[in-house]
Image (spheres, grey):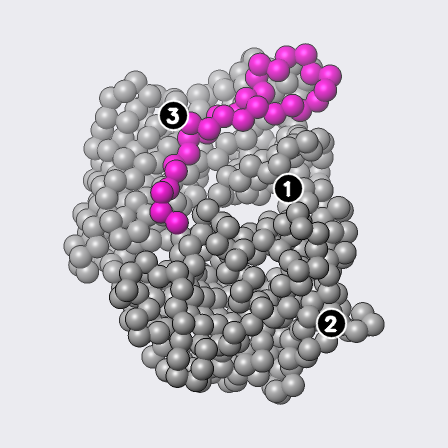
């Protein structure tokens, strides 16, 4: 149980109802990233150092020291990466993210290139391309099957990598992104990025594809030319990105000793890379909070070791009710969707429920074990359907945008107390990560006594995690 108390206004008289409680699943397993680098360089050294200080992520790296020799770091056993870059589904799909540094496309066999594509599309993993002498257009990536994975259309030429300085600047999307957030205040954050030491080099990554998002721009030379530095895109079940430089190490070397900009950026960047990389079980419900509803539809997607749909799995859910009793629900296959299982369950009483699931994906030998699913049902009288309460918060889209929720309009106002996607924080506090998107439940009209509705019932900004654990991997999914 995680509790957070926030000071909303200094003039508030009643602070007893300013506490927010959440059920949190703490995962002991750490996501692992595979980093392939084609040459010894400063970027490799400082990127590895930044991740070595991260207590959440793990990194295994392959460094090509000569044409036929590699140096492996961070492996968990002697068998891992023994033959270099993985050539099998079982080995490559054991990672949650991949970084490809200064490596030409010809380094990979056609089978490995297809495997990388399936890693993102089918596995749901994250793939990051870095700039370099042998990277992107310089390495023929734009003319290989890997080009489909890129968030940009690469230039059809070879002189894209330049050893010239380039300053950086956040785009509009970058000001709101969690990846590039070095300061809580957006204006101070943008100014901090403008004052970052210039990059040692840059690479023309081409034109962003439709649907891609540019978070950071580069301004080489006199600043008249603007090129994308960091571009991201969703691809299939996963995500891809390009960081078109090999010179971010200067953000570490040319900053004061206590400055953590370099480490913070790369840790946030690589956490984004692995966020959403699911295991062999993916579960969901139609919505996260049920207001005066008793029917709850549970849905689970089961995949085997090769991450192909498993049609012969057995999935059950043991549900613990607010009164302490338990029920067992069996999820049955959906005829129209291979590997998808569903069931309808009735929540008789309002309150908090926890479902403990057990699954067995028999094909491929992947056994899905216990999982915990916290959920909540509201009473009829708890939801102020006739009132129009205000949410003291800010969306990532626009201020004062009407939000519709069960027939009730909400007005969004910006105050000291902010609600952002993925974060809940105040002006005086550091962000508290919630590992998901916050869904806004009814916040009653704001008064001198804090969050209090017409009937005196306290409401909260709710988020519900739907978590699943597999014998092959453990993962958390937002319902």
Q: Which residues are magenta?
A: 1-30
In the figure, 103 relative to 324: above or below? below
Tell me which numbered mark, 3 or 1, is placed earlier along the sequence. 3
Crowding near pointer 2: few (<14 within 10 Å), some, many (20+)?
A: some
Q: Residue at x 62, y 63 (%)?
A: 249
Q: Which residue is mark 3?
A: 352
In the figure, 366 relative to 64: above or below? above
Crowding near pointer 1: few (<14 within 10 Å), some, many (20+)?
A: some
- Residue 316 is one of the magenta-drawn residues: no
Labelled pair 2, 3 in contact (Cβ < 8 Å): no
Front-lying residue, 268 or 458: 268
Tell me which numbered mark, 2 or 3, is placed earlier along the sequence. 2
* Apparent side of residue 336 relative to residue 401 in the rendered image (left or right): left
Q: Nearer the viewer, mark 2 or mark 1?
A: 2
In the figure, 317 relative to 83: above or below? above
Q: CA distance from mark 3 to mark 1?
A: 27 Å
Q: Give the structural element (helix, strand or loop) at label 3.
A: strand
Front-lying residue, 447 or 221: 221
Tell me which numbered mark, 2 or 1, is placed earlier along the sequence. 2
The image position of residue 148, as x and y in percent, is 49, 75
Q: Quadrant of the C terminus?
A: top left
Q: Give the structural element (helix, strand or loop) at label 2.
A: loop
Q: Residue at x 64, y 68 (%)?
A: 247
Q: Which residue is mark 1?
A: 395
Q: Which residue is mark 2?
A: 165
Chief secondary structure of the magenta portion: loop
Evaluate whether residue 23 shows in this view. Answer: yes
């Amino acid at each position: 149980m995680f509790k957070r108390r926030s000071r909303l206004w200094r003039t508030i008289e009643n602070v007893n109802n300013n506490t927010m409680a959440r059920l949190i699943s703490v995962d002991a397993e750490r996501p692992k990233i595979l980093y392939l680098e084609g040459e010894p360089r400063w970027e490799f050294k400082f990127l590895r150092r930044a991740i070595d200080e991260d207590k959440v992520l793990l990194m295994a790296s392959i460094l090509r020291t000569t044409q036929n020799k590699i140096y492996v770091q961070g492996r968990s056993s002697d068998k891992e990466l023994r033959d270099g870059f993985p050539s099998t589904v079982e080995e490559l799909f054991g990672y949650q993210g991949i970084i490809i540094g200064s490596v030409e496309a010809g380094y990979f066999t056609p089978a490995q290139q297809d495997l990388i594509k399936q890693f993102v599309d089918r596995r749901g993993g994250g793939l990051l391309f870095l700039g370099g002498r042998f990277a992107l257009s310089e390495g023929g990536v734009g003319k290989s099957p890997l080009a489909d994975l890129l968030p940009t259309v690469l230039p059809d030429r070879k002189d894209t990598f330049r050893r010239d300085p380039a300053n950086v600047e956040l785009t509009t999307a970058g000001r709101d992104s969690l990846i590039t957030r070095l300061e809580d205040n957006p204006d101070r954050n943008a100014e901090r990025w403008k004052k970052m030491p210039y990059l040692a080099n840059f690479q023309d990554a081409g034109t962003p594809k439709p649907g891609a998002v540019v978070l950071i721009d580069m301004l080489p030379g006199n600043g008249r030319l603007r090129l994308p530095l960091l571009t991201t895109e969703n691809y299939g079940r996963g995500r891809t990105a390009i960081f078109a430089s090999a010179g971010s190490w200067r953000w570490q070397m040319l900053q004061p000793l206590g400055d953590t900009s370099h480490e913070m950026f790369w840790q946030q960047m690589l956490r984004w890379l692995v966020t959403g990389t699911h295991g062999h079980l993916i579960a969901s419900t139609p919505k996260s909070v049920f207001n005066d509803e008793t029917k709850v539809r549970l849905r689970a997607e089961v995949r085997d070791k090769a991450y192909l749909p498993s049609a012969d799995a057995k999935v059950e859910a043991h549900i613990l009710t607010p009164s302490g009793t338990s029920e067992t629900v069996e999820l049955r296959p959906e005829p129209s969707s291979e590997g998808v299982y569903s069931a309808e369950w009735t929540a008789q009483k309002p309150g908090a429920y926890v479902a403990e699931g057990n699954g067995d994906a028999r094909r491929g030998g992947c056994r899905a074990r216990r999982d915990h699913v916290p959920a909540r049902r509201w009473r009829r009288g708890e939801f102020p359907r006739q009132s129009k309460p205000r949410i003291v918060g800010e969306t990532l889209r626009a201020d004062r945008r009407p939000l519709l929720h069960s027939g009730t309009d909400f007005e969004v106002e910006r105050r000291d107390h902010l609600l952002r996607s993925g974060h809940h924080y105040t002006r005086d506090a550091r962000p508290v990560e919630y590992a998901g998107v916050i869904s806004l439940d009814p916040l009653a009209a704001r008064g001198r006594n804090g969050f209090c509705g017409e009937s005196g019932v306290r409401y909260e900004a709710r988020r519900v995690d739907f978590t699943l654990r597999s014998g092959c991997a453990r993962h958390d999914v937002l319902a």
